[in-house]
Amino acid sequence: MLPGQGLGLIDDGLVACRDGLIVYAGAATGAPGLDALEILDCEGRWITPGLIDCHTHLVYAGNRANEFEQRLNGATYESIARQGGGIVSTVNATRAASESQLVAQTLPRLDALLAEGVTTVEIKSGYGLALEHERKQLLAARALQKQRAVTVRTTFLGAHALPPEFAGRADAYIDEVAGRMLPALAAEGLVDAVDAYCEKIAFSIDQTRKVFEAATRAGLRVKLHAEQLSNMHGVTLAAEFGALSADHLEYVDDAGVAAMAQAGTAAVLLPGAFYFLRDTKVPPLDAFRKARVPIAIATDCNPGTSPLTSLLMAMNLSATLFRMTVQECLVGVTRAAATALGMSEQIGTLEPGKRCDLAVWNIEQPADLVYRMGFNPLHARVWGGA
């Protein structure tokens, strides 16, 4: 996959790497003279950029399979929450776990992604909801890339939900997030970007603005969970702050799409949550296409609404549920996903100067990566040339 609007398919191609960076990607015929120390013959297999999962909540403790079963038996989300379930149960489990325990519980989820050719993953905090526990989540996320060959981008999501100790005091909690938690974690170098959940069941526009203003003061780019359940016009706020991405977006309107296009904000679609919650309001794909908004796809891996650890399955869900094309799905987990992380200069396409992150596939055509369900055709994964 070469730079440009399409996939940039090359028959009989060659990728050359030096010191972890691509020095040539293109047709083997006519390639410049390369004095290679090692040559790997992929035997006609397809090569793509390493896949990028640009929206996950991968680090958490416990699970909520029991709640899933309760909902299947007729319980409502509200009734489960009143019994101490929902996000509160994940917060309690995450707070009770040590950093090493969080790493141990997260590694199987990460390994599932890596086994499908993922070379870069974004990981959000947001299940600690207190400084020491948000720090612990971010430290665990950073520790993962010391144990696995993967690039981890950390996002501070302190404004994810209201912790029990701040019940009825949302403004006070946002003051804690923006005034204490965010500056401290940014100063410790644990934060690559800042996210918030702007929704009727979460935080308001004004509260989100306070978080974004604090992020700007800290020199950090922002992202936003927006327009998932209703149109709060959070996308317009995100665009005002030059957000890297706005995510979910089922209810975004034309004005929001136009604001995203103007700001260069990517749309991150999360079909796992759409499927798991049995949603019916589809994101406005045609509007994104017409406005040339980059469309990324991610797993949204989390214990409550998208327990998905397959980016290949996310592509299939995007095609079947959102009617995205094969090309859109492949771009969504490579070039557009890199844009959503602010990393388009480093990864996402195969071109000189970028990291040599590759996925080598046992497939006959690109559509194979989108059409299969529960089948992994990965032959090899290359991270930084290794």
Image: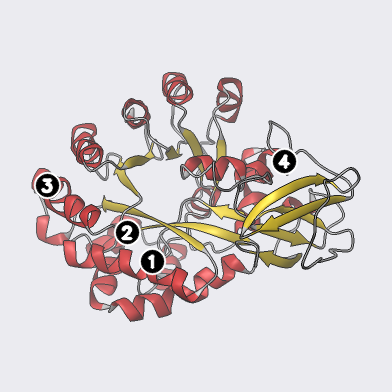
Q: Earlier in the sequence, mark 2 or mark 3?
A: 2
- 359 vs 253: above or below: below
Give the alpha-carbon distance from disc 1 to disc 2, as whole Å.
9 Å
- Which of 189/233 is in front? 189
Tell me the mark number nearer the camera, choosing from 1 and 4. Answer: 4
Foreground residue among 189 and 182:
189
Q: Which mark is residue 141?
A: 1
Q: Residues within 10 Å of mark 1 (few under 14, many from 20)?
A: many
Distance from disc 2 to disc 4, alpha carbons, whole Å, reads 33 Å
Q: Is residue 368 left or right of residue 73?
A: right
Which amino acid does the dot numbered 4 rest on? Leu
Instruction: Kindly identify the amino acid type of the residue bearing the numbered disc 3.
Output: Gly
- Label drawn at residue 323: none
Q: Which residue is mark 3?
A: 179
Q: With respect to residue 90, does 219 lie above or below?
A: above
| 201 with respect to 152 (left or right) | left
Judge whether 51 appears above or below 227 on screen. below
Q: Which mark is residue 2?
A: 4
